[in-house]
Image: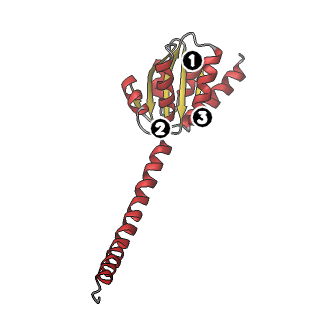
Amino acid sequence: MDRAKKKQLIDSLHTALAETTVVVVTHQTGMTVEEVTDLRRQMRAAGANFRVTKNKLAQRSLEGTKFEALKPLFKGPSAIAFSRDPVAAAKVAVAYAEKNDKLTVIAGALGDRPLDIAGVKALASLPSLDQLRGKIVGLLQAPATKIAGVLQAPAGQLARVVAAYAKSGKAA
């Protein structure tokens, strides 16, 4: 690879990392092309990216980003997963690593905060951003439904009392 291509790769990865929220560093040993392609598909479906890069190029791409503390982790067959959603990349990487022994999660970072393996797994166990949004919408709609039910209840009770008096023959 000539210098111009390396520079272009470093710049594109640097730009992508500057716009991301979470990075997960993995080691992948002996993964086939089909397995990597499958993992990339799963990442894309979740709104994340997965890249296998040369260690020196990845380290240079991290310079000047909030993930610069991850540079020493790039030894051996490394790859990175990253996403704007704070949970997506970690969730897919951890799930795939549990199914496939060839992928190992090493560490990660959420913003400028480094995460160890336990931190990445804890992050992966959180609900995704879309799931959280759904819960918030449900919580916001629930009070309106409850208020409507409470407002309708007295009128319904009054109608039942009037109907009971009407059946008994007493004047209301």
Q: Which amino acid is tagged 1?
A: Lys
Point out residue 60 in the picture as x, y percentages from the top left corner. Answer: 56, 23
Residue 157 placement, left or right of 4 = left
As drawn, the label of residue 86 is 2
> Quarter of the image holding residue 166?
bottom left
Residue 31 percent coordinates (x, y)? 58, 13
Q: Residues within 10 Å of mark 3 (few under 14, many from 20)?
A: few
Task: Check disc 3 and report its element: helix, strand or loop.
Answer: helix
In the picture shown, does residue 77 fall above or below 86?
above
Let me know if residue 106 appears in the view. Answer: yes
Q: Quadrant of the C terminus?
A: bottom left
- CA gap, disc 2 and disc 1: 26 Å
Question: Counting residues from the N terminus, which is met first, the one under dot 1 or under dot 3?
Answer: 3
CB atoms of marks 1 and 3 within 8 Å: no
Residue position for label 3: 45
Q: Relative to 5, say whether 77 is above or below.
A: above
Marks 2 and 3, how far apart at CA: 15 Å
Q: In the rendered image of this protein, does residue 65 appear above or below residue 100?
A: below
Quarter location, residue 53: top right
Q: Earlier in the sequence, mark 2 or mark 3?
A: 3
Dot 2: element: loop
Tell me the SS state at disc 1: helix
Going from N to C along the chain, the mark reached first, 2 or 1, is 1
Q: Residue lying at the far bottom in this picture: please name it.
A: 171
Residue 14 in sight here = no
Give the residue type that dot 3 points to.
Answer: Ala
Residue under pointer 1: 56
Above or below, comparing residue 84 to residue 7 in the picture: below
Q: Residue at x 52, y 13 (%)?
A: 102
Quarter of the image where the N terminus is located: top right
